[in-house]
């Protein structure tokens, strides 16, 4: 699976569940935790999620809406 596909799935999963662990994403996408962390770093830099110690959380704007 290419990086863009993984990141799209990661974003969809986080939007659906509000928060998701790196381990859960690695199992779902059949890849390593290291790769998921790299993908999370990319989407975090895009301002789409907030990276947490063990996963990601959907980023909300000042009014509480999803970005």
Image (spheres, rainbow, N blue to C red):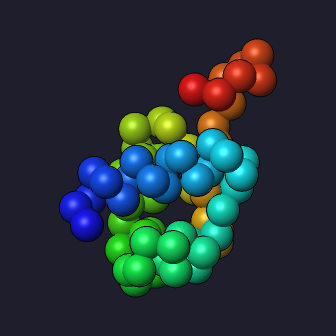
Image position of 19 with respect to 36: above or below: above
Residue at image point 31% right, 54% down: 5
Residue 34 makes an appearance in the image: no
Which residue occupies the extreme left position in the image?
2
Q: Is residue 63 left or right of residue 37?
A: right
62 relative position to 7: left or right:
right
Quadrant of the rendering where the N terminus is positioned: bottom left
Mark yes or no: residue 23 visible. Answer: yes
Q: Is residue 10 above or below residue 62?
A: below
How many numbered dots are placed on residues in this image? 0
Question: Which quadrant would the C terminus be assigned to in this image?
Answer: top right
Q: Is residue 52 above or below residue 45?
A: below
| Residue at x-position 43% and y-position 72% | 29
The image position of residue 37, as x and y in percent, is: 44, 69
Picture coordinates of residue 59, whole percent (x, y):
63, 37
**Which of the two residues, 44 or 9, is positioned nearer the viewer here?**
9
Residue 28 position, x and y percent, is 51, 73
Question: Which residue corresponds to the image point at 51% horizontal and 47% vertical from the top-left?
Answer: 11
Q: Quadrant of residue 41?
A: bottom left
Q: Is residue 52 left or right of residue 49?
A: right
- For the view shown, which residue lies furthest in the right direction? 64
Residue shown at the point (54%, 46%) measured from the top left: 12
Indicate the position of residue 35 as horizontal and vertical percent values: 36, 74
């Amino acid at each position: 699976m290419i990086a863009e596909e993984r990141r799209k799935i990661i974003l969809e999963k986080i939007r659906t569940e509000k928060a998701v662990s790196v381990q859960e994403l690695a199992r779902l996408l059949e890849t390593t935790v290291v790769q998921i962390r790299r993908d999370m770093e990319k989407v975090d830099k895009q301002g789409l999620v907030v990276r947490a110690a063990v996963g990601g959380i959907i980023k909300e704007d000042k009014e509480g809406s999803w970005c």
